[in-house]
Image (cartoon, rainbow, N blue to C red):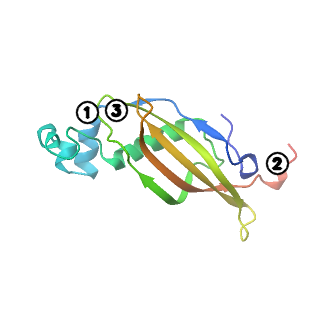
Amino acid sequence: MTEHYLEEFAAGQVFNTGHLRVDKEQIFAFAKQFDPQPFHLDEKAARHSPFQGLAASGWHTAAMTMRLMVEGEFKPAGGILGVGFDELSWPRAVRPGDELHAKSEVLEVRPSKSRPDRGLIRVRTTTFNQKDEPVMVFTGNLLVPRRPAASANT
């Protein structure tokens, strides 16, 4: 897929991803290395937690969403380069066997006033499970280059 420069983005555009199945062993491996809490590492402990069962770390969900985005339709020139978040929430737990997909909607496109070679886009990305229930929502601010002058006419 073709990469898109700032000028090619507009509020309201929607980009979709493929699907990614969540594996129990991946939940354990991620949690062991990055979020070693009992409800991510032990099924019995997880049953007695607010999750009432094994749940992926929210940060694992974020990492899986990033992979989906990189492999999906959303292709800013230079890559998906975040400079900050306006919001981040996990409305539902991600469970073993869930199949995730995401949708990114461009909310705003803003050329930089101080750096004429780039701008920012605000994008709301929602990650869904196989029931189309949201499991993560974030609004990110992304740095996107403007089309280089030499290739503007090609």
The image position of residue 144, as x and y in percent, is 66, 54
Disc 3 and disc 2: Cα gap in Å? 41 Å
Q: Please, is residue 119 above or below residue 48 in the view?
A: below
Residue 47: which quarter of the image?
A: top left
Quarter of image, res 119: bottom right
Quadrant of the image for the C terminus? top right
According to the picture, the residue beneath numbered tag 2 turns out to be 151
The mark closer to the camera, 3 or 2, is 3
Quadrant of the frame with the N terminus: top right
Q: Secondary structure at mark 2?
A: helix
Residue drawn at x 41%, y 41% is 64
Circle 3 Cα neighbour tier, 10 Å, few/some/many (<14 / 14–19 / ≥20): many
What residue do we see at 69% from left, 37% from top? 2
Amino acid beneath label 1: Lys
Q: Which residue is mark 3?
A: 22
Q: Looking at the rendered structure, which numbered label has been put on residue 52? A: none
Three-letter code, disc 3: Val
Q: Residue 4 lies in what quarter of the image? A: top right
Check if mark 3's residue and mark 1's residue have beta carbons within 8 Å. Answer: yes
Give how far across and how far down residue 25 sits, in percent: 25, 34
Disc 1 target residue? 24
Q: Inspect the image, locate mark 2, and give the three-letter code of the amino acid beneath it.
A: Ser
Could you tell me which secondary element the residue under label 3 belongs to? loop
Residue 40 position, x and y percent, is 22, 44
